[in-house]
Image: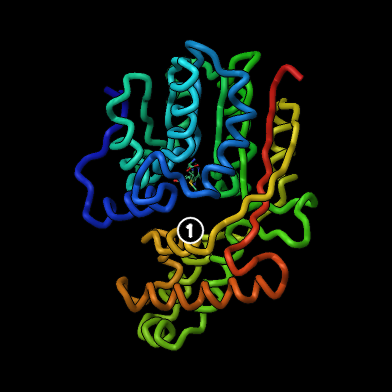
């Protein structure tokens, strides 16, 4: 039985959100049928991490979500007969609960919810040293997460990675939504299609009609929140400079991942992500507006050369970092 955090009762909405994201990664939720983009992107990350993992290693998955990276890591280690202590960390109850449900039966997995309320009732991130409770990680993986961390928080986060890694340990991360000079002209950032959907729907008549009934300030606040769901990507150099400031040496590689158009639709219709179409009322009308906008955006990307009739190409960057050089 897994240890650590487990969710209090989830609302039906939270439950549906976690299941939908899991199904965006695994066809029909079947762990043996990962979506092509998920399998391809995460396996490159695991290729970097695996040589450093042995029996008894303490491995942290920073930004576990519904378990996509952890599930693939455990499959690989199970097949090799390697047993580790895996510590899963995430702030999002709806997605993390799904990881807990999927991995609850495993004794080798520990869960830490990474947010808590401070004395004034404000939500804050917990520190890695508290979550690891004195343990040092041999390997930290962070898949598809660091581009979601606000740039102002990255230096401190990298210091935490550095302080909580064993001396010979490594940190590996990937991101498909980060700017870098490595990205070829015919390849997009992972979230470009979804930022495109947001732009398509920004002036949508039905959406604007609902927004016009809000107070101006409330409407502006609601719009700012939606713009944060798929933030404009920042440069890879921001992460590298934070890591190097925390004492890490860096090796960077990249990889192009094909993202099937049907998988893209499944991805953007995950309730938490489909919020980009709010305040359109959830349901078939909103989903239809998103599907139409996505089809249009992918057609434009095909013209621009970053997509085909089957889907789009996304650019992934992989970082491998150690403190020992
Ligand atoms: C795209 S998911 C990746 C999940 C998993 N690693 C995978 O490969 O499927 C990104 C995760 O990062 C978490 N996240 C978002 N903002 C974060 C932040 N500021 N700090 C830490 N984690 C964050 C989210 O809750 C989400 O579960």
Taking the image as drawn, is residue 121 in sight?
A: no
Q: Give 95 or 131, whichever is nearer the viewer.
A: 95
Q: Name the quadrant containing residue 49.
A: top right
Locate residue 165, reporting x and y percent: 58, 20
* Residue assigned mark 1: 263
Taking the spot 65% from the left edge, 14% from the top edge, the residue there is: 168
**Quarter of the view holding residue 276:** bottom left
Q: Is residue 288 left or right of residue 253?
A: left
Q: How is the image coloured?
A: rainbow
Say if 241 sits above or below 48 in the image: below
The residue located at (45%, 33%) in the rendering is 70
Q: Is residue 2 visible?
A: yes
Residue lying farthest top? 56
Residue in the foreground of this view, choosing between 132 and 82: 82
The residue most toward the right is: 181
| Mark 1 burial class by Cα count in 10 Å: few <14, some 14-19, many 20+ | many
Q: In the rendered image, which quarter contains the C terminus?
A: top right
Q: Measuring 68% from the left and 44% from the top, which residue is drawn there? A: 317
């Amino acid at each position: 039985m897994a240890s650590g955090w487990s969710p209090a009762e989830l609302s039906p909405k939270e439950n549906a959100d976690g299941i939908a994201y899991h199904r965006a990664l695994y066809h029909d939720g079947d762990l043996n049928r990962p979506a092509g983009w998920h399998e391809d992107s995460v396996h490159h990350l695991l290729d970097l991490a695996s040589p450093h993992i042995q029996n008894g290693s303490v491995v942290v998955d920073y930004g576990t979500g519904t378990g996509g990276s952890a599930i693939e890591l455990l499959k690989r280690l199970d097949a090799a007969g390697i047993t580790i202590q895996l510590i899963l960390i995430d702030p999002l109850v709806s997605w993390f609960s799904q990881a807990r449900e999927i991995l609850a039966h495993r004794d080798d997995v520990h869960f830490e919810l990474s947010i808590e309320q401070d004395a004034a009732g404000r939500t804050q991130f917990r520190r890695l040293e508290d979550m690891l409770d004195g343990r040092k990680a041999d390997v930290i993986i962070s898949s598809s997460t660091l581009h979601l961390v606000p740039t102002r928080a990255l230096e401190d986060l990298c210091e935490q990675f550095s302080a909580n890694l064993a001396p010979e340990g490594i940190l590996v991360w990937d991101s498909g939504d980060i700017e870098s000079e490595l990205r070829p002209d015919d390849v997009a950032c992972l979230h470009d299609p979804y930022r495109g959907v947001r732009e398509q729907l920004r002036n949508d008549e039905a959406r604007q009609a609902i927004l016009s009934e809000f107070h101006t300030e409330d409407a502006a606040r609601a719009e700012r929140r939606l713009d944060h769901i798929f933030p404009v990507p920042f440069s890879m150099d921001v992460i590298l400079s934070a890591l190097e400031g925390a004492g890490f040496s860096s090796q960077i590689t990249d990889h192009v991942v094909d993202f099937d158009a049907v998988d893209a639709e499944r991805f953007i219709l995950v309730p938490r992500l489909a919020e980009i179409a709010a305040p359109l009322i959830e349901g078939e009308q909103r989903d239809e507006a998103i599907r139409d906008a996505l089809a249009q955006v992918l057609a434009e990307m095909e013209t621009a050369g970053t997509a085909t009739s089957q889907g789009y190409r996304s650019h992934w960057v992989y970082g491998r970092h150690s403190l020992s050089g």
